Amino acid sequence: MTNPLETMTNSPFEIAKQAADQIRQATGVEKHDIALTLGSGWAKAADLIGETVASVPAKDIVGFSAPVVEGHVATIRSIKLPSGKHALVLGARTHYYEAHGVRRVVHGVRTAAATGAKVMILTNGCGGIKETWKPGTPVLISDHINLTADSPLEGATFIDLTDLYSKRLREVARTVDASLDEGIYAQFRGPHYETPAEVQMVKHMGGHLVGMSTALEAIAAREAGMEILGFSLMTNLAAGVQKTPLSHAEVLEAGREAEPRISALLAAIINKI
């Protein structure tokens, strides 16, 4: 069946509104305040931030499908925070390398905005370039380098990205853990890992983290007027920095080991926003 987001005659914002309406009906929550996309290693945070009001199979909501990557969950959850606000947890992330188009990649962000969310928290598991960072280190994203050669913006849509990743939210995060470091994230197209030469290119460009998500979603979130907190879990040193071959199993193992600690950290930060 053709996905409506792949049909150019359908506005991606109209499809996002339809998805948001379905989420309202399925959860009974009229408005969500905060949205989270939980990448590899971050999923347990959803169990710690508050009371789950409803959990909906992602495939039941227009424009979403079950994730294809191990380590991601297949649900959309509505959670009531201790503050009384509601968080929307998007477990079904579509990655750029799945070749469904950029509209699908950022559909979750646009749907979250259509539910009323003003804060978008984007997390990922990624490779690190700084040798002082050890696997399992959480890093705040201060900026990004988009190496996909693509954009979620369509037509003559000009959006300023000067302060894309909120300084205010990074400061909130540091009130929970003052030791948090930050870095610049580079999104590649994937699904292959980066070559050592590509990693060195990013290093010379000023980057510190390499991965296959987040940047395109952040651009769409800014277009929607959302405030963005970006968080990476450095699961391994990047190719060439790490002297052994990379593997997805390594990423998953580092995520499992770090998950309790970083999930508790993220939950504490959310409850201060």
Image: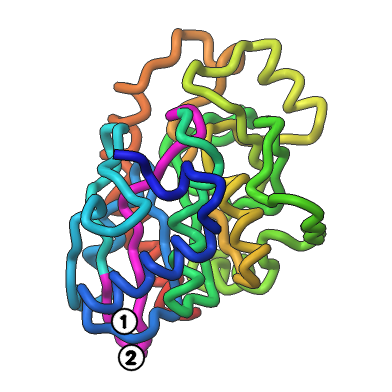
Rendering coords of residue 125 (x, y %): 44, 39
Indicate the secondary structure of the residue bearing disc 2.
Answer: loop
Indicate the secondary structure of the residue bearing disc 1.
Answer: loop
Quarter where residue 226 is shown: bottom right
Rendering coords of residue 14 (x, y %): 49, 65
Rendering coords of residue 215 (x, y %): 62, 45
Who's the residue at 25% across and 76% down the image? Answer: 50
Q: Is residue 79 above or below residue 89?
A: below
Q: Is residue 2 left or right of residue 245?
A: left
Who's the residue at 41% across and 49% down the image? Answer: 4
Q: Is residue 181 left or right of residue 59?
A: right
For the question of whether residue 137 can be seen, the reply is no
Who's the residue at 55% across and 36% down the image? Answer: 133
Who's the residue at 41% across and 41% down the image? Answer: 94
Viewer-closest of 33 and 202: 33
For the question of whether residue 2 can be seen, the reply is yes
| Residue occupied by mark 2 | 84
> What type is the residue that disc 1 sits on?
Leu
- Tell me if residue 188 is in the magenta stretch: no
Asked if the residue at tag 1 contacts the one at tag 2, i.e. Cβ–Cβ closer than 8 Å, the answer is yes
Quarter where residue 239 is shown: top right
- The boundaries of the magenta stretch are 78-98
Q: Which mark is residue 81?
A: 1
* Mark 2 Cα-neighbour bin, 10 Å: few <14, some 14–19, many ≥20: few
* Mark 1 Cα-neighbour bin, 10 Å: few <14, some 14–19, many ≥20: some
